[in-house]
């Protein structure tokens, strides 16, 4: 910065910046180039005369024969032998992508090395083939940085969409054996509500039960009525007992927070709660609720990155048991659902070249399926059930037939000492505490 200030003293000053691009997240030279007029050297095709910059994607070779690499014209598709390069370079010219900018920026890679130099197209193809065969990411980065003059962007941790689809199962009943309690999540969009119901079992093994989309503006009552009807419905368990959603979480972070708060306000006692995502590093899965919102409802902050860390590890499990995520062979659980579920990658986060942590990057626009998984995880955490005790209660209820309701007349109680006043009292049935006894 001091050198640049000193250079301004001279009318004919020139500041020259040159560097290997290195990592995309921390590159010093790439922002400078992107702020310039972004010039690239365009050379003519010897077959059709079309001018183009030389890029690595157009270097082609037969399978297993990188020594036969040639350049394929992006216009006519003809292969260009390397001996044409001399004439191509002589007839080339710099073309700026943004000629209106004052700063000149130049990009040049090893594909422009003059004919006869070591960095021939064949040599580069052979080097790349060796690196790919060894699956060496460090050498891939070096190749991209030094030969292609491009920044290296880590691909990050991602999920396998085809594999998840292959693992779908056919449920004999809506709630398979192993499900103990049901939760639900609601993602509020501008023109619809997307919802998913998930069943939880021992050690948080989960079964996706139902996925629905209620189309319509959340500013109108219709979609909320549909949601209310859906959350109250009954699903049959494998043991024959009926199951209901015990805890439901609604994401209120969108454009229709007012309507979401209004829906929650009258249903908080029915375990419907408002949530809002937080990507703050180290945030717990569910924070303490606060009522400092204009809906005056209990609002829970969800640590979305914390939830996704757990969810990503669970979706990679390939053995039934603790943490495993089951999905049904149903129309709603199609390729689009799994594309949304795998729509983010875990990336490294740097500050001045120092690794600071990780973040999740969206690789596509829609990710509602992923958000709904997070909301269901939060619902289970808010409910905080004793799954072992509930499993025992469920088994006990399934093994014992429900008794028939007897016909009872209210008894008359009189004071031990006769008096002119006779009292007629009807005893109240004792209340069953908690949701465990009344979850049906």
Image (spheres, rainbow, N blue to C red):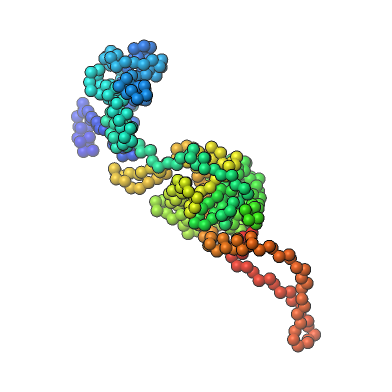
Q: Give coordinates of residue 177: x percent, y percent.
A: 58, 53
In terms of depth relative to the viewer, which is nearer, 373 or 13? 373
The residue that appears at 25% across and 23% down in the rendered structure is 119
Residue 278 in sight: no
Q: Give coordinates of residue 407: x percent, y percent.
A: 77, 68
Q: Residue furthest bottom?
A: 417
Q: Give coordinates of residue 425: x percent, y percent.
A: 74, 76
Q: Give coordinates of residue 353: x percent, y percent.
A: 29, 43
Residue 125 in sight: yes
The residue that appears at 78% across and 87% down in the rendered structure is 418
Residue 5, by quadrant, is top left
Q: In the visual, does 24 lie left or right of 242?
A: left
**In the figure, 197 relative to 160: above or below?**
below
The residue that appears at 33% across and 44% down in the rendered structure is 350
Q: Which quarter of the figure is the N terminus placed in?
A: top left
Q: In the visual, does 367 lie left or right of 351?
A: right
Q: In the visual, does 404 lie left or right of 372?
A: right
In terms of depth relative to the viewer, which is nearer, 91 or 103? 91
Q: Residue furthest right?
A: 420
The residue that appears at 55% across and 45% down in the rendered structure is 327
Q: Which quarter of the figure is the C terminus placed in?
A: bottom right
Tally the marks: 0
Residue 241, by quadrant, is bottom right
């Amino acid at each position: 910065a001091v050198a640049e200030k000193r250079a301004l003293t001279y009318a004919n000053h020139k500041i020259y910046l040159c560097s290997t691009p290195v990592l995309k997240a921390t590159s010093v030279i790439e922002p400078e180039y992107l702020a310039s007029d972004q010039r690239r050297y365009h050379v003519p095709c010897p077959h059709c005369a079309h001018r183009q910059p030389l890029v690595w994607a157009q270097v082609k070779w037969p399978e297993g024969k990188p020594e036969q690499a040639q350049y394929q014209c992006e216009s006519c598709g003809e292969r260009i032998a390397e001996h044409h390069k001399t004439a191509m370079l002589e007839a080339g010219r710099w073309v700026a992508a943004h000629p209106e900018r004052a700063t000149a920026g130049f990009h040049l890679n090893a594909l422009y090395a003059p004919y006869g130099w070591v960095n021939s197209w064949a040599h580069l193809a052979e080097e790349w083939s060796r690196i790919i065969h060894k699956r060496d990411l460090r050498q891939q980065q070096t190749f991209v940085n030094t030969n292609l003059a491009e920044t290296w962007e880590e691909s990050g941790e991602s999920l396998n969409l085809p594999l998840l689809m292959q693992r779908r199962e056919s449920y004999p009943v809506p709630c398979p054996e192993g499900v103990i309690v049901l939760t639900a999540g609601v993602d509020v969009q501008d023109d619809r509500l997307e919802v998913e119901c998930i069943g939880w079992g021992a050690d948080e093994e989960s079964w996706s039960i139902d996925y629905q989309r209620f189309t319509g503006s959340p500013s109108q009552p219709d979609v909320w009525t549909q949601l209310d009807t859906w959350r109250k419905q009954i699903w049959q368990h494998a043991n024959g007992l009926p199951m209901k959603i015990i805890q439901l979480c609604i994401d209120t972070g969108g454009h229709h927070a007012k309507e979401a708060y209004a829906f929650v306000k009258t249903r908080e006692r029915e375990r419907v709660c408002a949530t809002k995502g937080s990507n703050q590093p180290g945030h717990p899965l569910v924070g303490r609720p606060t009522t400092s919102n204009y809906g005056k409802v209990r609002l829970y902050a969800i640590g979305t990155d914390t939830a996704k860390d757990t969810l990503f590890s669970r979706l990679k499990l390939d053995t039934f048991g603790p943490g495993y995520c089951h999905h049904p062979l149903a129309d709603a659980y199609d390729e689009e659902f799994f594309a949304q579920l795998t729509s983010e990658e875990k990336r490294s986060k740097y500050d001045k070249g120092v690794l600071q942590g990780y973040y999740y990057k969206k690789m596509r626009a829609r990710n509602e399926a992923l958000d709904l998984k997070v909301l269901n995880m939060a619902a289970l955490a808010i409910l905080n059930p004793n799954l072992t005790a509930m499993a025992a209660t469920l088994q006990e209820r399934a093994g014992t037939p429900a008794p028939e309701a007897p016909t009872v007349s209210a008894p008359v109680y009189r004071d031990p000492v006769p008096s002119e006043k006779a009292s007629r009292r009807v005893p109240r049935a004792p209340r069953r505490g908690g949701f465990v006894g009344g979850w049906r």
